[in-house]
Image: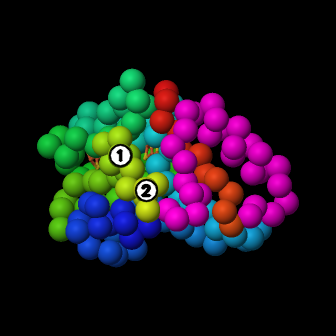
């Protein structure tokens, strides 16, 4: 996941990564990342109109020229994805690397996939039905609205 911080800040620093990997108490690991939600709560909470959802790709992004750094998006997001940018007083979040996700390119075990939302939901449903998730189970990241 440090590939994310390198792409965004030019440094390998897990704390600056816009996605995280945590241990799953059932076994293996789970990746925590922006889901580019159908109806993003971060967008609804933003008083500055700084968060947009691209209807063609489904990608949810923050316009840093409009952000006033109030953190309402972080509090509204169910998994607190938006974070204060390093050295900035504005928010940053995953933007899917503008359509070319670095984290997917560097994952040697191919555990991360960029798939249509319907397929992501099916994958998540399959994983939730298992008593123990294998460490290399594919994690769907939905992009289509
Ligand atoms: S930041 Fe949170 S609420 Fe906003 S699109 Fe990502 S997961 Fe959804
Ligand atoms: S921190 Fe920025 S993007 Fe987040 S709710 Fe406030 S103005 Fe909007
Ligand atoms: S798609 Fe890009 S910004 Fe999003 S988590 Fe992966 S490397 Fe980071």
Q: Closer to the camera, 66 or 100? A: 100
Q: Which quarter of the rendering shows the N terminus?
A: bottom left
Q: Is 64 placed left or right of 72 in the picture?
A: left
Residue at left offset 35%, top offset 52%? 93
Q: Which residues are magenta?
A: 107-134
Residue at left offset 64%, top offset 72%? 23
Q: Residue furthest front?
A: 108
Residue 126 against residue 84 in the figure, above or below: above
Which sits earlier in the primary sequence, circle 1 or circle 2?
1
The alpha-carbon separation of the residues under discs 1 and 2 comes to 8 Å
Q: Residue furthest top?
A: 56
Q: Which residue is mark 1?
A: 100
Residue at left offset 71%, top offset 38%? 122
SS category of the residue bearing label 1 = loop
What colour-coding does the image apply?
Answer: rainbow
Q: Closer to the camera, 124 or 3? A: 3
Mark 1 and 2 residues: CB-CB less than 8 Å, in contact? yes
Q: Is 75 placed left or right of 125 in the picture?
A: left
Q: In which quadrant of the rendered view does residue 55 lie?
A: top left
Q: Which mark is residue 11?
A: none
Q: Closer to the camera, 123 or 128? A: 123
């Amino acid at each position: 996941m440090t590939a994310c911080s390198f792409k965004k800040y030019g440094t390998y620093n897990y704390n600056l990564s816009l996605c995280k990997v945590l241990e799953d108490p059932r076994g293996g690991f789970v990746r925590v990342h922006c889901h580019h939600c159908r109806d993003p709560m971060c967008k609804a909470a933003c008083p500055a109109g700084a968060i947009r959802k691209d209807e063609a790709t489904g990608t949810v992004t923050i316009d840093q020229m409009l952000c006033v750094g109030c953190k309402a998006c972080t509090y509204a997001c169910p998994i607190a994805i938006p974070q204060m940018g390093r050295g900035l007083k504005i928010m940053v979040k995953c933007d899917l690397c503008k359509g070319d996700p670095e984290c997917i390119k560097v994952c040697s075990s191919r555990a991360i996939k960029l798939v249509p939302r319907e397929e992501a939901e099916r994958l998540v449903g399959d994983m939730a039905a298992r008593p123990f998730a294998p460490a290399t189970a594919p994690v769907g990241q939905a992009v289509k609205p």
